Image (cartoon, rainbow, N blue to C red):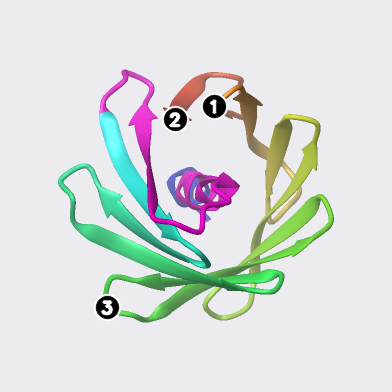
Amino acid sequence: MSMMKIWRIILVVAGFGLGAHAAETQTYRDSTGRTAGTVTTSGSHAIYRDAQGRTTMTSTTSGSITTFRDAQGRVIGTQTVSGSHATYRDAQGRTVATSTQSGGTTTYRDAQGRTAGTATRSGSQTTYRDAQGRTRGTKR
């Protein structure tokens, strides 16, 4: 799996830090501060849009499983959460990434167990870093 795909998973999953029941939108920015996309949540549903406002994906959470669908409604993957651990699978059920949370930091690993990046929450902002510690984006 490419690093870009892993980062896409990380940004998608991070959107679920929103515990909103009313519609709430959060903006993701790249390392230069430009808007990379948004996620709008309402209850257990979320809509993901790119920087131009086009819907790229949706998700629905039921219990501990979140199902992700592309803009055409096809299942593209799932996230299963158990305590502070999450497993991400592609549409064929293959594990593509995992994450563990400790305090305000979530560490993401690829399917081979190598660190792919981190997400660190400080106040209302989350900062995403790659495996080398370089800032890749933020969410507010």
The numbered mark, 2 or 1, whose residue comes first in the sequence reads 1
Q: Quadrant of residue 66?
A: bottom right
- Where is residue 80 shown, x and y percent of the image? 70, 67
Instruction: Using the image, tell me which numbered label, if any, was put on residue 63.
Output: none
Q: Position of residue 132 (x, y in %)?
A: 61, 22
Secondary element under disc 3, as helix, strand or loop, is loop
Disc assigned to residue 124: 1
Count residues near mark 2 (Cα–Cα under 10 Å), then give few for <14, some for 14-19, many for 20+. Answer: few
User: Which residue is pictured at 73% across the width and 57% down the height?
Assistant: 86
Q: Which residues are magenta?
A: 7-34
Q: Circle 3 sits on which residue? A: 72
Looking at this view, name the residue that lies furthest to the left: 52
Q: Secondary structure at mark 2?
A: loop
Q: Residues within 10 Å of mark 1 (few under 14, many from 20)?
A: few
Image location (x, y in percent) of residue 101? 77, 41
- Crowd class of label 3 (few under 14; some 14 to 19; many from 20; radius 10 Å): few
The residue that disc 2 covers is 140
